[in-house]
Image (tube, rainbow, N blue to C red):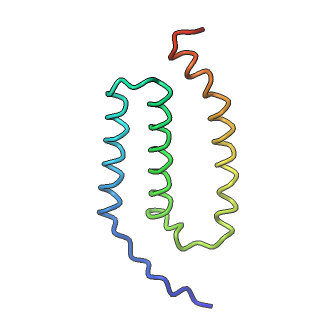
Amino acid sequence: MENTQSHKVNYTFIWIMLGALMAVSVGVSLLGLPARVGALVIFAVAAWKAFLVARNYMHLRWEGAMIYAILLIPLALFAILFFTLFPDLFRQAAGGK
């Protein structure tokens, strides 16, 4: 069966969104929020930016299910590294050793 979806992407809108999300990340770092809250917001914004880039600029929107199964490996690695390094980040931010 042929894929009938349109492959038109508004790259200008995606670029503006990426710029706005970058401004949110920088703004959060300048607000003086607690380290945990700031880091969580920045990580969430980074994940959203990665999703926008992968979905639109890498054209994953039109790929089959196999590419999403392959995506699970780096996502699992990210989760392992994030939860392994997360305590060290905040121990250091709180002034501990």
Q: Position of residue 58 (x, y in %)?
A: 49, 63
Seen in the picture, residue 8 relative to 56 is either above or below; the reply is below
Query: Is 91 situated left or right of 20 in this image?
Result: right
Total numbered labels? 0
Q: Residue at x 31, y 62 (%)?
A: 13
Judging depth in this view, the residue of 73 and 41 nearest the camera is: 41
Seen in the picture, residue 81 relative to 12 is either above or below; the reply is above
Q: Identify the residue at the far bottom of this view.
A: 1
Query: Is 54 situated left or right of 75 in this image?
Result: left
Q: Quadrant of the C terminus?
A: top right
Q: Residue at x 47, y 24 (%)?
A: 35
Q: Residue at x 48, y 31 (%)?
A: 39
Q: Position of residue 31 (x, y in %)?
A: 32, 28
Q: Position of residue 28 (x, y in %)?
A: 36, 33
Seen in the picture, residue 13 relative to 83 is either above or below; the reply is below
Q: Quadrant of the N terminus?
A: bottom right
Query: Is 41 situated left or right of 1 in this image?
Result: left
Query: Is 81 situated left or right of 14 in this image?
Result: right
Seen in the picture, residue 6 relative to 15 is either above or below; the reply is below
Q: Residue at x 45, y 38 (%)?
A: 41
Judging depth in this view, the residue of 95 and 64 nearest the camera is: 95
Judging depth in this view, the residue of 31 and 4 nearest the camera is: 31
